Image (cartoon, rainbow, N blue to C red):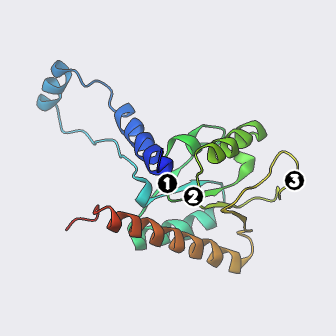
Amino acid sequence: MHNRRKFLKGFLAGGVALGMWEDTSTGALAKSCDDEVREVPKCFAWQTTIFCQFGDPGLLSDVGAYARRIGCDIYHGEPFSPDIFAIPYFVAIVDRSTLTSESWAEYLEFREEVEDTTPCILVDSLGASDGWPIYDRMEILDPNIKHHVHGILDRIREAHLVAQEWRIENDLLGP
């Protein structure tokens, strides 16, 4: 396939979107028209989603403020869940201790298999030791060091610019 990454991102986004609806039968849709208007589940587009799976509240506050400033959403991954595979995003910030070493190995295998070059910022102290290797487009930054927080925000900015360029090239920005 010519552009596997684009295909997989779209496929995953579509799968997530379709999986969010409880009942789409005609009867259920008609019944819901009579009910109160309910909040529609949020769909996450990879071009505007920052994936976060870590527990540092200070870093989360900084990333959240920056995400609001650039018009992006944050998806908070659940520890020890497959969220890192299922949610589309343009940059990930991950504490690998919220995953098992087996699921981290599967994630790396998945990235390699689909030639995923999405930036992934690691905010843990596991280093690149046995069982916790890192690949291209992955960087370990310590959020306890102030200039590293600025580095994390810089990486988000850089990845966001790439996502915006993709949206422009594919005419997805609209009016």
Whole-percent x, y for residue 150 in the image: 62, 78
Which residue is drawn at the image coordinates 88% and 48% (left, top)? 130
Task: Say left or right for 96 vs 127.
Answer: left
Whole-percent x, y for residue 118 in the image: 57, 58
- Mark 2 — residue? 118
Q: Do the residues labelled 1 and 2 touch (CB within 8 Å)?
A: yes
Which residue is drawn at the image coordinates 65% and 62% (left, top)? 137
Q: Pick the residue in front: 3 or 102.
A: 3
Along the polypeptide, which appears first: circle 1 or circle 2? 1
Q: Which amino acid does label 3 sit on?
A: Ser
Q: What residue type is labelled 1?
A: Tyr
Describe the element under mark 3 as helix, strand or loop. Answer: loop
Q: Which amino acid does label 2 sit on?
A: Thr
How far is disc 1 from disc 2 in space, using C-alphas? 8 Å
Whole-percent x, y for residue 64 in the image: 50, 65
Which residue is drawn at the image coordinates 28% and 24% (left, top)? 23
Residue extending farthest right:
130
Which mark identifies residue 89? 1
- Mark 3 — residue? 129
Task: Say left or right for 42 vs 130.
Answer: left
